[in-house]
């Protein structure tokens, strides 16, 4: 069987990349083409994304991919959730705001004065996160000047093709999608002063959005369609989690740790609401019943602060090896404490939570961070099991966190469950698989797609100790 090739654009909160995916009956491969930085930039009116630079990186990466693999048949785009750009007459009004901008606090207060969180949960099934899109929309003074609002992957797809659509898995993170129907909640939007006309038509993963604009065909080097994938990066990642049974939990771990179960029906109970569990949509209409846990952001921000203090890079593998060798018990802190949500001087804020017990060595401090993340993972797994009434027999940990052996082992130890680590590139693999399926180049069911992942990307197993 001939290998089929697609291009996957995978954008995270700290970096992005363009990859080539190759698929046939027994093959699933990724080739990195380009990697580029991404992150917040401070402007006069707040924290934004440098979207112009991001777009240029994407287009150049796609051009490199086509030069390297002329057989590429399509493009898929996934990214972080909730952030958006506003269009007026086909032009971007301004740089998209960053979800960590402080304006969202005012949005929460104003939205909840109109629609209390208990009502919102019954409508959208989402956990409370202060940066969810509806809170951002509420305080965005530019809405009246716009004719379309597009989440980041959809905005990039528009710039590539001219098509204005909202891919459903990412749209489910806005707070404006009804949890039962998966359609826009225009009545809620109207109550919140959000013009429903801004919300574009919804499409499902696997839909052909459109073809590259003529000027981009010349620049990229091929006339390619853009196919909607699970454009929320976690939706793509969960699609590629090699779960063989519904008794498996997943943790998609990078900047955030998304911890949960895949369900076919929502759990809209008071207990689920109080536990702050969310119902984001996944590929093929599944529910990603999960809780956001602050992930390796805590470690990366701590390392960044130490590097600034030292003026030299920190060797992360060396630091983690030293942390693994720490014999004594280390103190824990709440990884989800709101004081840890913003960038800047993470060691000082963590030390304030640890108090007098804060480890004095960097190895011990790093061990406290990793063990605290694992403890938060364990609590979320236990809560998911109780809320869904489902016994959990294993955990699949995918994404960048699967390379952190200390974190994987700590998660196994604290949950008492086997942890199956990998694939690292679950998000890009899910992106590739949905494109390939749309091209009739991959199996038709989600279960068979995952079986292909399991056969080609065997996970590393960590068993609980003691």
Image: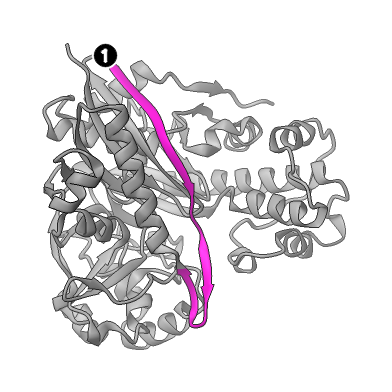
Could you tell me which quadrant the C terminus lies in?
top right
Instruction: Note whether residue 285 is visible.
Output: no
**Main SS, magenta residues:** strand
Instruction: Note whether residue 244 is visible.
Output: yes
Mark 1 neighbour class, 10 Å CA radius: few under 14, some 14 to 19, many 20 or more: few
Q: Position of residue 23 (x, y in %)?
A: 25, 22
Please tell me which residue lies in front, 365 or 414.
Answer: 365
Which secondary structure lies at badge 1? loop
Instruction: Read off the residue under disc 1.
Output: 26
Please name the residue shown 17% across and 11% down the image. Answer: 1
Please name the residue shown 47% across and 28% down the image. Answer: 422
Q: Is residue 33 magenta?
A: yes
* Residues in magenta, as a range: 27-48
Residue at the outermost top position: 1
Identify whether 45 is placed above or below 87.
Answer: below
Please name the residue shown 18% across and 53% down the image. Answer: 215
Q: Position of residue 350 (x, y in %)?
A: 73, 60
Please tell me which residue lies in front, 402 or 27.
Answer: 27
């Amino acid at each position: 069987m001939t290998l089929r090739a697609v291009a996957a654009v995978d954008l995270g909160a700290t970096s992005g990349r363009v990859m080539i995916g190759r698929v046939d009956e027994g093959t699933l491969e990724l080739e990195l083409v380009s990697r580029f930085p991404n992150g917040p930039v401070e402007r006069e009116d707040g924290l934004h994304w440098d979207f112009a630079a991001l777009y240029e990186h994407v287009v150049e990466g796609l051009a490199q991919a086509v030069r390297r693999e002329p057989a590429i048949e399509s493009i898929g785009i996934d990214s972080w959730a909730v952030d958006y750009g506003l269009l007026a007459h086909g032009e971007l009004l301004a740089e998209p705001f960053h979800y960590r901008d402080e304006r969202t606090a005012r949005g929460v207060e104003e939205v909840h004065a109109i629609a209390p969180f208990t009502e919102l949960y019954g409508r959208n099934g989402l956990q409370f996160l202060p940066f969810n899109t509806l809170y951002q929309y509420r305080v965005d003074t530019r809405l009246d000047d716009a004719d379309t609002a597009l989440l980041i992957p959809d905005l990039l797809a528009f710039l590539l093709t001219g098509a204005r659509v909202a891919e459903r898995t990412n749209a489910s993170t806005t707070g404006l999608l009804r949890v039962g129907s998966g359609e826009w909640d225009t009545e809620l939007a109207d109550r919140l002063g959000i013009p429903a006309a801004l919300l574009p038509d919804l499409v499902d993963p696997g839909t052909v959005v459109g073809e590259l604009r003529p000027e981009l065909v010349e620049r990229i080097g091929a006339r390619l369609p853009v196919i909607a994938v699970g454009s929320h990066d976690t939706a793509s990642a969960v699609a590629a989690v090699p779960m063989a049974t519904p008794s498996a939990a997943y943790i998609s771990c990078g900047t955030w740790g998304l911890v949960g179960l895949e369900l076919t029906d929502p759990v809209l109970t008071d207990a689920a609401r109080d536990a702050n569990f969310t119902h984001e949509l996944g590929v093929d209409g599944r529910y990603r019943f999960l809780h956001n846990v602050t992930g390796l952001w805590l470690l990366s921000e701590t390392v960044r602060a130490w590097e600034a203090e030292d003026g030299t890079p920190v060797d992360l593998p060396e630091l983690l090896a030293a942390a693994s060798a720490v014999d004594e018990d280390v103190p824990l802190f709440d990884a989800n404490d709101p004081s840890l949500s913003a960038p800047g001087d993470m060691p000082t804020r963590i030390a304030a939570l640890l108090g007098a017990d804060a480890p004095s060595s960097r190895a011990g401090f790093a061990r406290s961070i990793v063990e605290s993340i694992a403890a938060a993972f364990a609590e979320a797994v236990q809560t998911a099991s109780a809320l869904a009434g489902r016994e959990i027999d294993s955990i699949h940990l995918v994404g960048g966190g699967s390379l952190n052996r200390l974190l994987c082992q700590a998660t196994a130890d604290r949950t008492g469950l086997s942890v199956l680590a990998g694939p690292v590139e679950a998000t890009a693999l899910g992106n590739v698989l949905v494109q390939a399926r749309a091209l009739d180049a991959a199996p038709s069911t989600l279960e068979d797609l995952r079986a292909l992942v399991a056969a080609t990307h065997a996970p590393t197993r960590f068993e609980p100790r003691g």
